[in-house]
């Protein structure tokens, strides 16, 4: 019995080590926006070949948010998407329009570390028409750890379109509260 338990523990530890070696950056598990007094769990989002989102768990609950792109904290653009509201229930980004330059967005990682991103601007983009979002500006690659927080904005149009606009908070990594030496080294913090 003891030998079987030891084999199980060694097997789990080996599997965790292989995962860490394959992708050493811890993934995001939670997003918090202190100014809005809101937070949400995070799940990985996927994208179809035509560029549309596969919502998965995010589509089922107003309270669940998702992330896409590079893992937050890595060089490049990480995108966090969450609902403004869904089927009459207020979502975590209901008041995203109240964010302003200098506000912060905190992302908790699997290893217990927290990344702090500072908002530089919040912009609204029409979903259709001449003022549509500049896709490369919102989703394009960055040469530093960048974050985009997206939700719906503007007036509600109908069930198919939803809201007329997308609201985007642009933010950059400004602080790391790292619990593990590995995260400190990966992100470049003492």
Image (cartoon, rainbow, N blue to C red):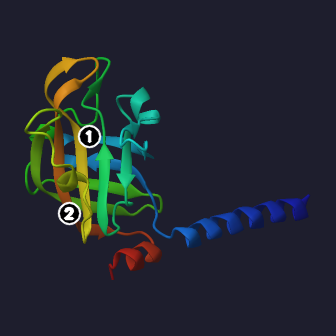
| Residue matched to label 2 | 172
* Place of residue 114 in the rendered image (x, y in percent of width and height, measured from the top left): 34, 61
| Residue matched to label 1 | 38
Q: Can residue 35 be seen in this view?
A: no
Q: In this view, does 151 lie above or below 102?
A: above
* Place of residue 50 in the rendered image (x, y in percent of width and height, measured from the top left): 38, 41
Q: Circle 1 — which element?
A: strand
The reply to whether dot 2 and dot 1 touch (C-beta < 8 Å) is: no
Q: Earlier in the sequence, mark 2 or mark 1?
A: 1
Q: Which of 47 and 188 is in front in this view?
A: 47
Quadrant in which the C terminus appears: bottom left
Q: Circle 2 — which element?
A: strand
Quadrant in which the N terminus appears: bottom right
Cα gap from disc 2 to disc 1, whole angstroms? 19 Å
Measuring 18% from the left and 34% from the top, which residue is drawn there?
127
Q: Going by the image, does 1 lie left or right of 86?
A: right
Circle 2 or circle 1, nearest the eye: 2
Q: Going by the image, does 47 lie left or right of 165?
A: right
Measuring 37% from the left and 51% from the top, which residue is drawn there?
68
Measuring 33% from the left and 79% from the top, which residue is drawn there?
188
Q: In which quarter of the image is residue 143?
A: bottom left
Label 1: how many Cα within 10 Å (few below 14, some 14–19, many 20+): some
């Amino acid at each position: 019995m003891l030998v079987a338990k030891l084999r199980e523990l060694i097997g789990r530890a080996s599997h965790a080590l292989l995962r860490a070696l394959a992708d050493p950056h811890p993934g995001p598990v939670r997003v918090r926006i202190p100014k809005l007094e809101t937070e949400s769990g995070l799940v990985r989002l996927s994208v179809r070949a035509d560029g549309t989102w596969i919502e998965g768990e995010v589509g089922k609950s107003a309270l669940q948010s998702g992330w896409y792109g590079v893992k937050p904290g890595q060089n490049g653009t990480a995108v966090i998407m969450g609902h403004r509201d869904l089927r009459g229930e207020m979502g975590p980004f209901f008041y995203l329009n109240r964010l302003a330059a200098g506000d912060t967005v905190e992302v908790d990682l699997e290893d217990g570390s927290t990344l702090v991103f500072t908002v530089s601007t919040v912009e609204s983009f029409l979903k259709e028409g001449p003022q549509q979002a500049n896709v490369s500006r919102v989703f394009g690659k960055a040469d530093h750890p960048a974050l985009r927080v997206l939700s719906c904005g503007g007036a509600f149009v109908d069930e198919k379109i939803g809201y007329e606009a997308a609201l985007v908070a642009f933010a950059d990594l400004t602080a790391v509260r790292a619990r593990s030496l590995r995260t400190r080294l990966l992100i470049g913090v003492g």
